[in-house]
Amino acid sequence: MRLSFDKEVDAAYIYLKDRIGKGEVKSTIALNDDIILDFDEDKKLIGIEILSASKVVPPKVFSEISKVSS
């Protein structure tokens, strides 16, 4: 599992596998306006996108993401 955060768009992404290749996401489900689930062709959950992340993710998590991303 890997975490990433893009400050410019205020979005976090949780990768549930090492890499998600281009075109690998075959379907998505929006749980609400800010949480989007990505699935592969076998309907396996492979990633979670969190929009407006700074509003819903605790600040401590962002410091952990920085450690993982660097």
Image: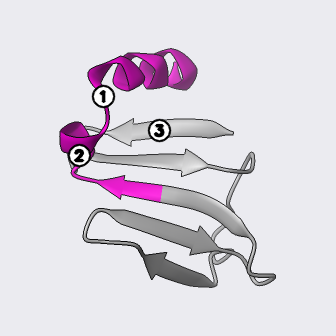
At label 1, the amino acid type is Pro
Q: CA distance from mark 2 to mark 1?
A: 13 Å
Q: Quadrant of residue 44?
A: bottom right
According to the picture, the residue beneath numbered tag 3 turns out to be 4
Q: CA distance from mark 3 to mark 2?
A: 11 Å
Label 2 Cα neighbours within 10 Å, binned few <14 / some 14-19 / many ≥20: few
Helix, strand or loop for disc 2:
loop
User: Which residue is located at x 65 percent, y 74 percent?
Assistant: 39
- The image shows residue 26 at horizontal and vertical percentages of 64, 84
At label 3, the amino acid type is Ser
Query: Image check: 9 left or right of 26?
Result: left
Outermost residue on the right side: it is 42
- The image shows residue 21 at horizontal and vertical percentages of 69, 64
According to the picture, the residue beneath numbered tag 2 turns out to be 10
The span picked out in magenta is 49-70
- The image shows residue 28 at horizontal and vertical percentages of 52, 80
According to the picture, the residue beneath numbered tag 1 turns out to be 58
Label 1 Cα neighbours within 10 Å, binned few <14 / some 14-19 / many ≥20: few
User: Which residue is located at x 28 percent, y 22 percent?
Assistant: 59
Q: Earlier in the sequence, mark 3 or mark 1?
A: 3
Q: CA distance from mark 3 to mark 1?
A: 14 Å
At label 2, the amino acid type is Asp
Q: Earlier in the sequence, mark 2 or mark 1?
A: 2
Label 3 Cα neighbours within 10 Å, binned few <14 / some 14-19 / many ≥20: some
User: Which residue is located at x 30 percent, y 28 percent?
Assistant: 58
Query: Image check: 1 left or right of 14?
Result: right
Query: Image check: 37 left or right of 56?
Result: right
Q: Nearer the viewer, residue 18 or 37?
A: 37
